[in-house]
Amino acid sequence: MRYLYSKWDGSQEGESVDGNFIFDQLSDDLLYNGDVASALRELMSKGFTGPDGTRVQGLSEMIENLRQRRAELLGSRNLSSVYDSIKDEIDEIVAMEERALDEAELLADDQDRLAFERKRLELSAMSDDLAQRIRDLQGYEFYSQPAKQRLEELISGLREQLIESTFSQMKGSLSNMGPKQRQRLAQMLAELNELLSKRAEGIDVSDDFSHFKEKYGDMFPGVSTLDELLDLLARQATAMASFMESLDDQQRLELAELFDELLGDLDLAWQLEMLSENLSQMGYHPSGRPVGLRGNQDVSLGEVGDLFSELTRIDQLEAFFKNPPSPASLADVDISGVGDLLGEDAGKSLAELAELAKSLKEAGLIDNKEGFLRISPKGLRQIADGALKELFSKLKHSGLGEHPSWRSGLGPDLEYQTKAYEYGDSFNLNINQTLRNASLRQGAGFPIKLSADDFEIERTEATVSTSTVLLLDLSLSMPLRDNFLPAKKVAVALSSLVRSKFPRDFFALVGFSEVAREIPIAELPSVTWDYVYGTNIAHALALGRKMLKGQKGTKQIILVTDGEPTSHVLPSGEIFFSYPPAPETLRATLSEVAKCTSGGIEVNSFVLDADDQLRRFMDKLVRANGGRVFYTSGSRLGDFVLVDFIKNRKSSL
């Protein structure tokens, strides 16, 4: 089945989804794996709480509610009652006839008694099979007219209920069906089969379907295309097939024969068989599966269609929700039908989930390139700025960085304090403080006469140009220890800080696992870990040192890792790996540290989940370079890196 539900016509549209808000909800997932489609699927699965506090249900929650609804239906309905109720009604009709014969026999003569006895024998010889027994009764000459009338009502009622169940979406047009309505139904099926036969031959049937819809559209409310009609008919056929498969063998055989008998009287059995063949040719293969109903609530034949249509819809929705191709694909679901099944809130939630990708595109945060959703340049900036904002927000409450240790100087960043002007200072005159100094010196009165000693200037923070390369550990241990996301978030935040506050600085990124590689800043949000073991700090340091060559100002390498060196590049170009770390790997790494030191590059290390062996190595690194090492956790990594970076930019003047 190509589409399980009717197309979304827009009438079910939910509240407008704010793209910027949705993007913020996706930021951690985007940072973790860099995949827009994957992040959207995760958000669709878990749902979210909107900015107004309204809960938007996720698909996982809807799946659980669908399962609860299925369990409720299966646990409350008694499917055997369909067969039993027909059998009981036939038994009662026979009993009515037998009672009438008994009463008449009391007043009958011998000849009539013989006739009554033959009738009893005829009744007792009738088959136990439902269809055959009804045929036998139809050929039987009733003595009791009420019993005969009850049989006619049973057959008429069963026929109408069967049609209602077979075409459960057409109840409004089939209720109280008379001969004309039955004839119209048969004619509709004949014309539909003819239309489908033409389509199977490759003939354009657009005009034919328009005419068909004008003539029979009242039978299929809400259907606007031929494919939607085929979907509807296939679902109904699947529902009835599931009903039949859920019966025991005897019930299935007897009811199938009975249904053929009932529909055959209307010339519908053949048309339905043709419809089934045409659906198969169109790519629809409705097949049922047994359903174990185990409750006490009786089900009539007329209710079977609705019951199994609902169970079929639950199965199809659950299967679709488990792996939707994209948010936009949710628009192919009958959203109002989901509301009927799971409640209005679920329908609204589904409508909002269907709009996720559209809202992000309209906000300019993602785009579609070559069929793939990707983060746009605007989206990249928003992720970086969001990460920086989050980390600075944590800093505000952490107590870190509240006591600046740098001195005042000539830099551009105002401290909002003043100092007496000295020769060589930038003349950022503070008018208010200068006039106040003059007034205090000369006393009250005008005009105020200024002298050089009155000049007061704005204090500024002295800053220096900094060239930084961040070495980010991408080995498999990082995600396994839950360190990858906080480390990557720090890298993204630091790139945003440099771009927005220190645009003249040089900032570059190196990712490393068994080998190291430069990562363009624009590709940082999509970077993920490497599925390999190996921590090649030596190669990362060598690449970082090469990138800093020729750069001006203070040079530093920031190393973020959770493991000691376990690999290095051999002179032959091969990768050597050993765990525990081999002495030659440690020597190769410390050799690169020494080269950084001789090149005036400070190596500052931020180490996650350090054990004693890693601490001993880091002590050697610090002694060889003179940089700093910070031992921290993923939750505090950003605090340490940002504070140290900012402090390191202040010159000690």
Image (cartoon, rainbow, N blue to C red):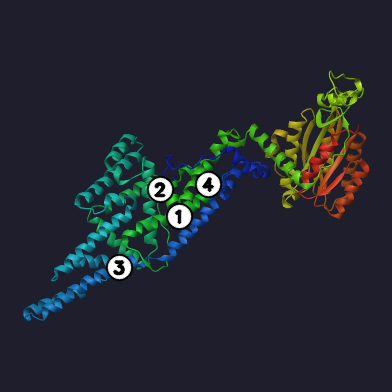
Mark 2 or mark 3, earlier in chain: 3
The quadrant in which the C terminus is found is top right
Q: Nearer the viewer, mark 2 or mark 3?
A: 3
Name the residue beneath numbered marker 1.
314
Whichever of labels 3 and 4 marks the residue nearer the N terminus, that label is 3
Q: Position of residue 329 (x, y in %)?
A: 50, 42
Tell me the CA gap for discs 1 and 2.
Answer: 19 Å
Note whether 260 is above or below 512 in the view shown: below
**Residue type at mark 3?**
Ser
Q: Residues within 10 Å of mark 3 (few under 14, many from 20)?
A: some
Residue 386 position by quadrant = top right
Q: Which residue is mark 4?
A: 324
Q: Secondary structure at mark 3?
A: helix
Question: From what the image shows, is residue 604 above or below residue 65?
Answer: above
Secondary structure state at the residue bearing disc 4 = loop
* Residue placed under numbered mark 2 in the picture: 284
Q: Amino acid at mark 4?
A: Pro
Q: Amino acid at mark 1?
A: Ile
Residue situated in front as seen by the camera: 513 or 395: 395
Instruction: Give the number of marks.
Output: 4
Q: Is residue 110 visible?
A: yes
What separation in Å lies between label 2 and label 4 (alpha carbons)?
20 Å
Depth order, front residue of 46/418: 418
Q: Are marks 2 and 3 in contact (CB under 8 Å)?
A: no
Judge depth for marks 1 and 2 and give the one in front.
1
Pick the front one: 345 or 235? 345
The residue tagged 3 is 85
Residue 115, which numbered label? Answer: none
Looking at the image, which residue sits at the far front?
445
Give me the C-alpha separation between circle 2 and circle 3. Answer: 33 Å
- Tell me if label 2 and label 4 are in contact, CB under 8 Å: no
